[in-house]
Amino acid sequence: MTWRRAIALAACAALLVGAPPFLPPYALTLLTQILIYAIFAMSLDLLLGYTGLASLGHAAYFGIAAYVVAIMTTQHQASFWACLGAALLAACAAAAVFGLVAIRATGVYFLMITLALGMVTWGLAFRWVSLTMGDNGISGIARPSLSSGLSFARPLPFHYLSLVAFLIAFGLLSLIVRSPFGLSLQGIRETERRMRALGYDVWLHKYVAFILSGAFAGLAGAMWAYYDGFVSPVEIHLVTSVETLLMVALGGPGTLVGPVLGAGVIVLFKNLLSIYTKRWLLILGLVYIGVIVLAPKGIVGAVRGAR
Amino acid sequence: MEFWLTQAFNGISYGAMLFLLGSGLSLVFGVMRIVNLAHGSYFLLGGYVGLTTVSRTKSFPLALLSGALSVALIGLGMERLFLRRLSRQSLPQVLMTMGFALVFQDLGLLVWGGDPYTLAVPAFLAQSVQAGPVFVQFYRLFIIAVAFAVGIVLWVFLERTRAGASIRATVDDAEMAQGVGINVPLVSAGVFALGAFLAALGGVVGAGFIGVYPGLDFEVLPYAFVVVIVGGLGSLPGVVVGSLLVGLLDNFGKALFPELSYFTLFAPMALILALKPTGLFGKR
Amino acid sequence: MSAVAALAVTRLCKSFGGLRALQQIDLSLAPGERHAIIGPNGAGKTTLFNLIAGELAPTAGRIALFGQDVTRLPPQRRAALGLARTFQVNTLFPSLTVTENLLLAVQGTLPTKLRLHRPISSYRDLYDRARAVLESVGLVGAGEVIVRTLSHGEQRQLEVALALASRPRLLLLDEPTAGLSLAESQRLTGLLKGLDRSMSLLVIEHDMDVVFDVAERITVLHDGKVIADGDRDEVRANPLVAEIYLGTG
């Protein structure tokens, strides 16, 4: 089992590293997009799948990081490391503040309060025109280059940069969910009451998970700003938050492979479908309904169930 | 002075439309604890159906009726066929309603196209007069009157009828209500249809005022949530206060601090939620 | 031994709305004492546990653990002082394995629980302690089983095992033998009797055989009040107790 797993992981890694130079340009951009959304979906899964907290405002941290990169790049020509550091810090800070407000609530009230906090952030991006350019968004974000002269402007180097970000996120998150702290989060997901009786400060664990999750969402948001070269309030919108929830639910919450698969399916689906039909939104809506009706435990859950 | 009176009047009339939108969402949340992301779609679809009815029949009252009733049927179908099986599973419910919101958005685009429309209101409502310093549009008065009438009817229905008592009992404690013999599934279906009805009514009224266009659904959805969250989940007086507060905050916010206007709207909501998760008038 | 009491409950009251669930309860446990609380359903036994464990806040009165006032402390802080409890209804982590359940219990009072830079599998000492607890309750070999699939009796044993895993100084057991077969119940009684005397024991139990077998002191609760308190023979001989409780059983 573990051997097979290791071989599968190695094969995936080899494919991810070796295949890109041979891919057609469009396929390469899609793959880059998938990697970035996979980071985003995994970050949400730390909350949803491991801690049992369904956030309806997770796009806030993604969006805040993306805006930080956009503003620092276009107005201050800041370096890659400065942008990345500031973006992660901003996402963490936002999660730290929002977490104080949200963590007290449970169940459907947690959904409502994170929805509200997401709306606050979206409202700022939409209306604070002097900072964010409002609905027009900020365009012209240049791809990063390092002081050593290494440039990520072209699609292939940028893809590898995204791959590094993805592998770092995947590695760190794998470590976190397998750590004592990660097990504690799963205990909280299962039975908060027992966790308190066993000596756990449930609030503190949730709060730390909330901030960590915001940080990884921020990493995804920063990469997205560089990838797309354009940031607008759409990045923070409720629809984006819910779409990420769909990725996790579709792939299989409580696993890290699940959100990656979910991100892959949804990104491919949206992009390819919009080529072939104008009615892709309708079909995406049906996918939402279909996932809930047909695969309530996601792809990973369905595969495990079939075994 | 003129500025304050005009903004206050505009705020109250906008709040009246928000009351129609928010009261249904609040009832649905109170009874079923569902975060319904398709609620803005009911508003949009109501507006579209009303638009078509007016263009075919030239009758505004018929537009109100057909818009609200047809969307109530859609809501009923959604509840009976899809949401019922997800009772109390909040995340699947949210994703399900999001799916419907996308489907409705695209169907709206398919049937009515991408152009914005304004519903032609009866001539006597299209007038306006200068009352002292304030420029009074009759249609805004009409919206306030409709909201007032709906509010009274809802209040009488909830407080003075047997069905209303069942709804209130279910809002307080669904399990207990089931225990004392209230048919909770029936109440849920009825309230869901009623919620869609009210939102669609708001949509028809709003179509003569802010118009109807693709994207309106997700534009009004945040407002509906703010109204409900500020006022309290499942409380009718809460929705009245919430919608007036939001209508006024939104108008004054846009006029005074245009850059922060959504913030002035959403920040109080987040604060209220943080301090009192059930809203100003909500009960646990 | 004149050491401070493991548990000292003083004039404890709890009301829910107008309903007075507990009135002026006094209760103390010497270190190492085996103490049972009996009483009919609705007497307030579980409410008392929830107050001692910190899940509920008392309306009035004071609770001290090992000489320290804990009346205002949240449950996790009381656990850190050496309190552990079981629940009347199994309160486990159903989709985790038995070993994972025990690891959670073992690390609950250790600083390890906040570490996130090393996989838990590298903490061999946690696993060793989990295995030891597993053996002591007789669930050997069940380590990799998902808890949801265990039988009720096995889940009940795990319920007790989770409380033992943190090596508490005071253990609260809420009807530990509920739903167990006679053999299972006897096994558990044997386990409880064999527990180290460094641990104090407070048990809510309906099975009088278990009560008289395990406890040396018994407190009788009725309608939220203590109506009798003494050793086995005193309680047995108390006519009020016989009328209200033993007589009906």
Image: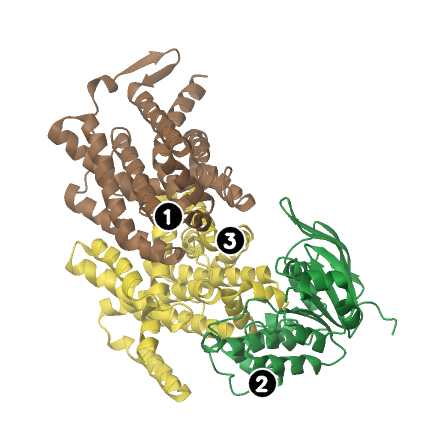
What's the CA distance linking mark 1 and mark 2? 46 Å
Quadrant position of residue A263: bottom left
Is residue A56 visible to the viewer in this orientation of the structure? yes
Residue C68 vertical position relative to residue C18 in the rendered view, above or below: below
What's the CA distance linking mark 3 and mark 1? 40 Å
Which residue corresponds to mark 3?
A: A94
How far across and how far down the image is residue A239, in percent? 34, 52
Q: Which mark is residue B184?
A: 1
Q: Nearer the viewer, residue A75 or A173?
A: A173
Q: Chain drawn yellow, letter?
A: A
Q: How are the colours assigned in the image?
A: by chain
Badge 3 amino acid:
Ala
Q: Chain drawn green, letter?
A: C
Residue C52 vertical position relative to residue B150 in the rendered view, above or below: below
Circle 1 sits in a helix, a strand or a loop, which is it? helix
Which residue corresponds to mark 2?
A: C138
Label 1 and label 2 in one chain: no
Q: Chain of mark 3?
A: A
